[in-house]
Amino acid sequence: MAVVGGGLVGLGTAWQLLRARPGLRLVLIEKEPGWGRHQSGHNSGVLHAGLYYKPGSEKARLSVRGLQEMLAFCREQGIAHEQCGKIVVATAQEELPRLDTLWQRGRANGLEGLRKLTPEQIREIEPHAAGIAAIHVPQEGIVDYPAVAAKLAELCAALGGYLQPNTRALAMRRTANSWVVETDNGAIEAKFVVTCGGLHSDRLVRAAGMKPKAKIIPFRGEYFMLKPERQHLVRNLIYPVPDPQFPFLGVHFTRMIHGGVEAGPNAVLAFAREGYRWTNFSPFDFAESLTFPGLWKFLKKYPAMCTYEIRRSLSRAEFCRSLHKLVPEIRESDLAPGGSGVRAQAMMPDGALVEDFHFEQAEGILHVVNAPSPAATASLAIGAAIADKITGL
């Protein structure tokens, strides 16, 4: 078998396949020199429990299962993690019905220990947070995902997997009973191929001669860090109640596993699929986005939100104002430049975002086309699900 893509989902898939089938000949290729270099290593490092996701969805099922598998993996392998808990805070009356929806979803998804909080109870957990009501999610936590990726690569090699970084998949063609993956480092023949391309997932579908149902549109999320003398304002994780009228969660506060507190992210269209800064520009990537009809329909549907996200990206003061909603004591001078990540957002031609995990399959090949958050948390469960799909080969 061949697995294309060395992020957490690709590594988790390779590891689960090797565990399920001792003696399996498996090669994992990755275009970067190391593992988990993009979405897997450019996120908040949060362990998601499944509060937000529609009951019965792949996201809900794999998130709940994936959290337990990731926690067990981190305990067994000695990877830094902590179930510190999270509060989701309503700051206005109109958010209360949406908070209740989250409560119902969390209970339906089997989350343990959920609590409804009064303003006084909010301040017991997060003394500097504002809110008229909240949900406490004790199962949520933080983790070192780059360490998870490195350990998975190590374990795959120990199980006999052949790991090949610095190898880019260029094309894939079907033969009588196998696939040939053409790379810039030679050809690989495999009975079955799994692609986990993240920011390039739709391109791998096309490289295999198929037409992807969705297009990947890159959205950059930018973060600030709280300066050390102001990190006491946030103990653990403080999240807003998402607005269903808009497609993105909104800025939040995250304590990092190795220290520091992150604030963000926003969501702006990136000019490159690996565009971590405004100055990162790929004419090919940007033209591909602009010529996709779905993007224009999306922009037409959410003009105010898109304009605001750009303004917030360019203005620290505006970014700070959005953080005031959760922690009123935050000042612009408290914020230091942080990192950024690029979200591989799958979008349909009508402008609708693909919210759930999305797979496309043909004989001998399976593509993971959309693996948004909580894919990092759920990566081992996604890998196990893929292994189950193809166990009969």
Image (cartoon, rainbow, N blue to C red):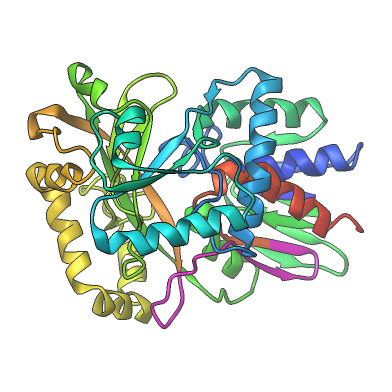
Asked whether 259 falls inside the magenta stretch, the response is no
Asked whether 352 falls inside the magenta stretch, the response is yes
Answer above or below: position of 142 versus 186.
above
The residue drawn where x is 64% and y is 47% is 64
> In this orientation, does residue 170 appear?
no
Rendered-image quadrant of the C terminus: bottom right
**Would residue 215 be found to the left or right of residue 56 on screen?**
left
**Would residue 333 be found to the left or right of residue 110 on screen?**
left
What is the magenta segment's predominant secondary structure? loop
The residue drawn where x is 71% and y is 55% is 194
Q: Where is residue 45 drawn, in percent x and y? A: 46, 34
Pick the front one: 271 or 237? 237
The residue drawn where x is 25% and y is 30% is 225
Pick the front one: 271 or 46? 46
> In this orientation, does residue 344 appear?
yes
Answer above or below: position of 37 versus 378.
above
**Would residue 169 be found to the left or right of residue 355 on screen?**
right
Q: Where is residue 147 drawn, in percent x and y? A: 55, 25
Pick the front one: 141 or 355? 141
The residue drawn where x is 29% and y is 28% is 234
Q: Where is residue 1 drawn, in percent x and y? A: 80, 50
Instruction: Write down the quadrant of residue 329 in the picture.
Output: top left
Answer above or below: position of 107 versus 356.
above
Q: Which residues are magenta?
A: 347-366
Q: Where is residue 314 drawn, in percent x and y? A: 12, 49
